Amino acid sequence: MKTNRRSFFKIAGVAGAGVLAGSSFSSCTTGEKGQQPGPFAAIKELADRSHSQVFNMSGFAAPKIDVVRVGVIGLGSRGPGAVERLSKIDGLEIKALCDKLPDRVENAQGILAKTDCLQPKATQDLQKYGKNFVRATSWTLCI
């Protein structure tokens, strides 16, 4: 028998329906004792257990910060786009730009020169500023 695309999809559809129907019927049980518990019985037992809520972050709001100051590490392929997007956010100040290659920092400063942003500090010293930066690259590539 020669199988073309149409007959292949018919066969695949019937086979898929058979698999779904077979798996749904096998999950129906009568609740008889002596049956083996399923693989998720422990999870179901924990979920059904009553417990009190300890802490919930829903509704948490940090206090408002008038000006958020950030720096950007890694100004290669993704960094300049991040600098451009960050420069358009109200209440955000780019304080420093960092990359191993000085020409990339100059390129990012050129992007910021086209906006009304203040010129940030250019640095290659990650040890001093690394904790408060937005990283646009892998940390291992920066060091």
Image (cartoon, rainbow, N blue to C red):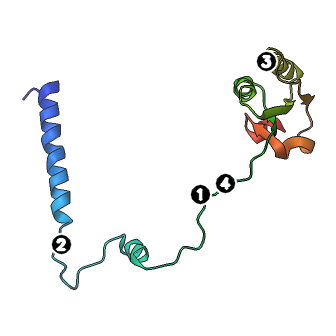
In this picture, residue 98 sits left or right of residue 4 = right
> Residue 115 got which mark?
3
Dividing the picture into quadrants, the one containing residue 3 is top left
Residue under pointer 4:
61
In this picture, residue 139 sits left or right of residue 8 = right
Residue 82: image location, x then y, percent: 71, 28
- Viewport quadrant of the C terminus: top right
Who comes first in sequence, dot 3 or dot 4? Answer: 4
**Residue found at x 64% / y 57%:** 60
Residue under pointer 1:
59
Q: Which of marks 3 and 1 is in front?
A: 1
Who comes first in sequence, dot 4 or dot 2? Answer: 2
Secondary structure of residue under mark 4: loop
In this picture, residue 103 sits left or right of residue 83 = right
Q: What residue type is labelled 4?
A: Ala
Q: Which of marks 4 and 2 is in front?
A: 4
Tell me the distance, in whole angstroms, between the alpha carbons under discs 3 and 4: 31 Å
Tell me the distance, in whole angstroms, between the alpha carbons under discs 4 and 1: 6 Å
In this picture, residue 117 sits left or right of residue 42 = right
Tell me the distance, in whole angstroms, between the alpha carbons under discs 1 and 2: 42 Å
Cβ atoms under marks 4 and 1 closer than 8 Å:
yes
Q: In this view, does 23 lie above or below 42?
A: above
Cβ atoms under marks 3 and 2 closer than 8 Å:
no
> Residue 29 got which mark?
2
Secondary structure of residue under mark 3: loop
Secondary structure of residue under mark 2: loop
Q: How crowded is mark 3: few (under 14 residues within 10 Å), some or many (20 or more)?
A: few
